[in-house]
Image (spheres, grey):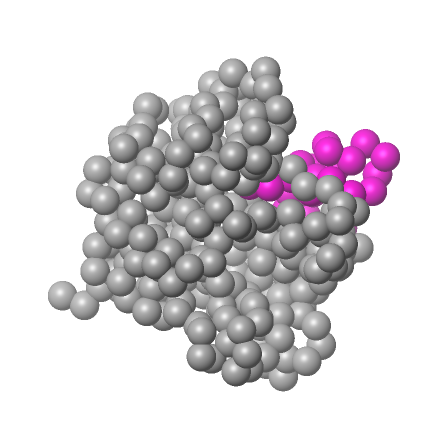
Amino acid sequence: MLSYLHGFHAGNHADVFKHAVLTLLLEALLAKPKPLVYLDTHAGAGVYDLESGQAGKTGESAGGIGRFWAQRAAFPELASYVAAIAAHNPDGGCRRYPGSPLLAGHLLRTHDRLILMELHPNEIATLRQTALGDPRIHLHHRDGFEGLPALLPPKPARGLVLIDPPYEVKSDYKRVADGLAAAYARWPTGVYAVWHPRLGVQRDQADSLLRRCLRHVPALLVTTLQVRPQTDDFGLHGSGMAIINPPWQFAERLTAVMPRLAAVLADGSLQANGWSLEWRKRNV
């Protein structure tokens, strides 16, 4: 399906959570001087105008980056995330929001590589303009589910994969698990981060997705952030990231950030802590 456009949701609470986790993952990998590669299966347009008609129609960024930006000084651990946003807003505001490719591009060094996949023709066209002139970036106009295992193992054989589809259709959940299985079989030493939505009771498939993934990998470090109580409707009340092969001490760094991030992004209706972090292991 090619109907999904992230511009309607850019900068929402799920983006802030996802990009905070991504920042900490990349910084942990960058602690070593060896080159690395970043692969993004659903790269999107690269950067988003939060005052565009798309963003204005939903207003979701107000409850995400709008809240975080006002409290950004309280997150020294996410200084690189803040700096990546600031680099696209020289006037000091937060109108232009970088997606995961530009966030990664801001953090990575000259000897690192980015492999970005995007199928939507309009999104890839915008991404090409955004990435123009950056020799580290390699763009692929292709289905990320199909492209990921085909491009593995990468060179250098050290790095991070972000699997972040829109989940607009139910088959995306199965394709994530199947794609992860194929990728892990080809590159078992890579770090993988699988973003997934947390929806209403009748539509939430997060747990079944994680069970599917655990058929193919030995363990997942799963972190979630919830901004409002789960209800019976379709609404996105939170999201999660499942991480395979997390870097050393990554869990400790994430634990230090998540309570504050959850407090900033919560809409005030939660009666309990809005975040979690746990290991899930395959039953053998």
Would you identify the image quadrant in which residue 49 lies?
Answer: top right
The percent coordinates of residue 201 (x first, y second) are 47, 80
Residue 215 to residue 11: above or below: below
The percent coordinates of residue 234 (x first, y second) are 53, 73
Residue at the (27%, 42%) spot, across then down: 183
The percent coordinates of residue 146 (x first, y second) are 31, 40
Residue 13 to residue 263: above or below: above
Residue at the (57%, 61%) spot, across then down: 258
**Which contiguous range is marked in magenta?**
73-100
Residue at the (64%, 47%) spot, across then down: 7
Q: Which residue, as the protein is rendered here, is positioned at the far right?
A: 91
Residue 215 to residue 2: above or below: below
Q: Is 176 left, or right, of 42 in this rendering?
A: left
Q: Tell me the quarter of the image containing the C terminus.
A: bottom left
Total tally of numbered discs in the picture: 0
Q: Is 218 left, or right, of 267 in this rendering?
A: left
Residue 140 to residue 27: above or below: above
The percent coordinates of residue 15 (x first, y second) are 60, 53
**Viewer-proximal residue among 252 and 2:** 2
Residue 241 in sight in this render = no
Q: Is 266 left, or right, of 229 in this rendering?
A: right
Q: Is residue 130 magenta?
A: no
Residue 98 in sight in this render = yes
Residue at the (27%, 33%) spot, across then down: 150
